[in-house]
Image: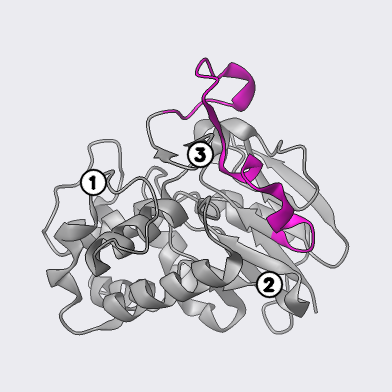
Amino acid sequence: MADYFVGDLQGCFDGLQQALAEVEFNSSKDTLWLTGDLIARGEQSLQTLEFLYKNQDSVKTVLGNHDLHFLSVANKIKKENPKDLLTPLLQSPKLTRYIDWLRLQPLVLALPDNSGFMSHAGLAPHWQAEDAVYWSEQVQSILMAKDYTDFLPSMYGKKPTKWHQDLSELDKIKYAINALTRMRYCSLDGELEFDSKCAPQDLADKNLQPWFEYDKQRFIQNKWIFGHWASLMGETKNKNILALDTGYVWGQYLTIYELKKDSYIKIRAIDK
């Protein structure tokens, strides 16, 4: 029984299959953990969701920003991003069941043996892990409700960028979604910033820092596994901060991490 963690798939089904073959993944005893952004920019979003849905008993995933946006596109609340390649999925006769499966997924998952947590983007600066779990549950309950589509237009926008207990309930939900699915950098006092996507060594603004540099004491005892930030190429300089999005959809690598062995395998993107 092994736990394999894989970075952002972005609809790259062939890459996933190559990675699973490399580790001899056995769906009857192993578990596949995914950092979110399952679909969108790659050409095989339909095949990817078909596979994950079929093997859902051995799959654990969090939702990423692309997965959340897909819910809006599929419900005709937002237009498809021209950079996304979702048409085959949107035209699938099984679209509704895939939507409903995605709606069941959380924004945060606890790792086996209380070893840490996983989210798509990270842990908000002023939060502890239990805060992330709590607000993930609140978002998940909204998405699971029959009237969830009423909420979807409200989840967009960059504000609020800083956590306060006196925020409205809606603003707390929006902050949670942004922190858990969109965040990369924050200011030195913990205000979220959403415009910078480069690697830290290329960052010009010295008033910003990666979210995982804020209050590093939070990660001494627990791992935090995340995706979302391809330009990191897996480098965080902290053994407990595991960045698994290594840009497969952009021609780089798909990273697969085995928890028990604390080992990595990287699959080079398939040339087309």
Q: Which of disc 2 and disc 1 is earlier in sequence?
A: 2
Disc 1: which residue: 157
Mark 3 vs 2, N-terminal side:
2
The disc labelled 2 sits on which kind of residue?
Leu
Q: Nearer the viewer, residue 59 or 64?
A: 64
Q: Is residue 218 magenta?
A: yes
Q: Nearer the viewer, mark 1 or mark 3?
A: 3
Callout 3 secondary element: loop
The residue at 22%/72% (across/down) is 93
Which residue occupies 70% across, 67% down?
Answer: 116
Q: CA distance from mark 3 to mark 2?
A: 28 Å
| Residue position for label 3 | 189
Find disc 2 in the rendering and name its residue: 111
Q: Quadrant of residue 262?
A: bottom right
* Along the viewing direction, whichever of 20 and 201 lies nearer the viewer: 201
Marks 1/3: CA–CA distance? 21 Å
Any magenta on residue 174?
Answer: no
**Residue 39 visible to the viewer:** no
Give me the residue at 68% from left, 72% from top. 111
The answer to whether residue 178 is seen in the rendering is yes
* Residues at discs 1 and 2 in contact (Cβ within 8 Å): no
Dividing the picture into quadrants, the one containing residue 128 is bottom right
Q: In this view of the protein, which residue sits in the foreground, 183 or 103?
A: 183
Of the residues shown, which amino acid type is indicated by label 3? Asp
